[in-house]
Amino acid sequence: MIFLLNSFSVKMLPPEVFSDLKPAIGEESWTDFPEVSILFKKLPERWVRALVREESASTHGVIISAIGHEATAKVLSERLGVEIPAERRDVHLRRAKLDTFPATFIVCQVELPRLAEGQVLTEQEVKAAPITFYEVLVLD
């Protein structure tokens, strides 16, 4: 199973990361606060393309799109060779297990400066921008 995302947010972290027992007010120390380690691994586009195509060709392969913008989904479909629908959805990452990885989370980051409020990119604008791919792992 592969999740394709166009961004990463702290809200995607597993809820249990932040639900640890909290110390009494005034008694906490730096080590009392919950923490999580996140690994971002930069991937070449050709590798992501192969991974996505292999997953889509598999009998049990599943690709879940969390690409929230129509133009980005169209450009990614062209570049990766697999239909990627525009889908606005909440995604919650799970902690990676060393012996099994039930899902792969890939951020497809369109490399542009921050957009003006309400600005929507055209397909041509997304095509002209570099896209960087990152695998995201939440570590124990």
Image (cartoon, helix red, strand yellow):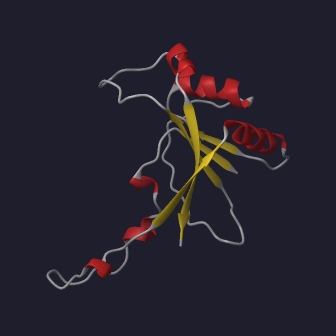
Is residue 140 found left or right of 9 in the rendered image? right
Q: Quadrant of residue 20 in the image?
A: bottom left
Which image quadrant is residue 114 in? Answer: top left
Relative height, residue 101 to residue 11 (above, below): below
Q: How many marks?
A: 0
Instruction: Determine the residue positioned at 57% across, 19% down.
Output: 127
Outermost residue, left direction?
26
Percent coordinates x, y for residue 135 in the rendering = 60, 50
User: In percent of the image, x 37 and y 69: which residue is there?
Assistant: 18
Viewed as shown, does residue 97 lie left or right of 28? Answer: right
Vertical relation: 43 (above or below) 100: above
On screen, residue 66 above or below 126: below
- Quarter of the image for residue 65 reads top right
Which x, y percent locates residue 59? 85, 47
At a point 62% along the width and 30% down the height, the residue shown is: 85
Q: Position of residue 107 (x, y in %)?
A: 55, 43
Left or right of 52? Residue 17 is: left
Residue 46 position, x and y percent, is: 73, 37
Q: Measuring 54% from the left and 68% from the top, which residue is drawn there? A: 139
Q: Nearer the viewer, residue 26 or 14?
A: 26
Judge by depth and name the residue closer to the eye, 70 or 140.
140
Q: Nearer the viewer, residue 87 or 35?
A: 35
